[in-house]
Image: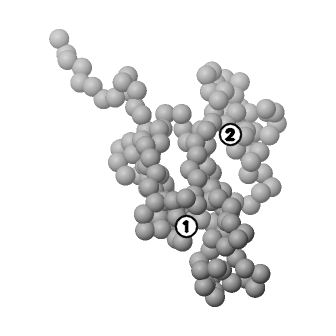
Amino acid sequence: MTINKLPSIFKQLRPVSIGFDNIFDHFDRLMNDISGAPTAAFPFYNIVKTGDTTYDIEVALAGYSKGEIDVEYADNLLRITSKKSDPLDTMDNGETKKGTIHQGISKRYFSKVFTIADDVEIKGAELKDGLLKVSLNKILPVHKKRKIIEVK
């Protein structure tokens, strides 16, 4: 990692921060991934806070089935991708074998990546009515949970 690529605030904080190397490295990877590449708008998504420590990522995937979507988590990155469509589904004249004359619902390949914090776990994913919902839960360590201290 090169410190020159980091925004100036990180350059100032890194020398006086201990134990945060993974955060700085993560932001460096993130900056390298997005530098020069426009953020793809498709598919559209929401990030919803559903409770004090719970979140849902909702991704609009009309026309996709469960078998056409991969949800993968590694190295603090949640990656949602569509599988490449089968070229046998389309005939030479552009018409699909299912009899579709016009296809207005997109079935294009996509990849959407979300950065997940170390203290957030992925509970599961569900595709229902064209909406993929990935449920997340922030884990609070015992020493950070609220407790009542008895005064003696």
- Disc 2 vs disc 1: which is toward the camera? 1
Question: Hey, what amino acid is under mark 1?
Answer: Tyr
Say if residue 80 shows up in the picture. Answer: yes
Q: Secondary structure at mark 2?
A: helix
Res. 148 image quadrant: top left
Location of residue 25 with respect to 100 vertically, above or below: above
Q: Quadrant of the C terminus?
A: top left
Residue 79 shown left or right of residue 127 in the figure: right
Say if residue 13 shows up in the picture. Answer: no
Mark closest to the chain's N terminus, 2 or 1: 2
Q: Residue at x 64, y 79 (%)?
A: 97
Q: Where residue 80 sits: x, y (%)? A: 59, 53
Q: Secondary structure at mark 1?
A: loop
Please state which of residues 36 and 73 is positioned toward the viewer in this rendering. 73
Which dot marks residue 64?
1
Q: Where residue 24 sits: x, y (%)? A: 68, 33
Q: Quadrant of the N terminus?
A: top right
Q: Residue at x 41, y 52 (%)?
A: 49
Q: Where residue 94 sits: x, y (%)? A: 73, 82
Residue 149 shown left or right of residue 74 in the figure: left
The residue carrying pointer 1 sits among few (fewer than 14), some (14 to 19) or many (20 or more) residues within 10 Å by Cα, namely many
Q: Residue at x 59, y 80 (%)?
A: 98
Which dot marks residue 27?
2
Location of residue 41 with respect to 29 vertically, above or below: below
Q: Which residue ends up furthest to the bottom in the rendered image?
A: 101
Residue 120 shown left or right of residue 114 in the figure: left
Location of residue 145 with respect to 107 vertically, above or below: above
Question: Hey, what amino acid is under mark 2?
Answer: Phe
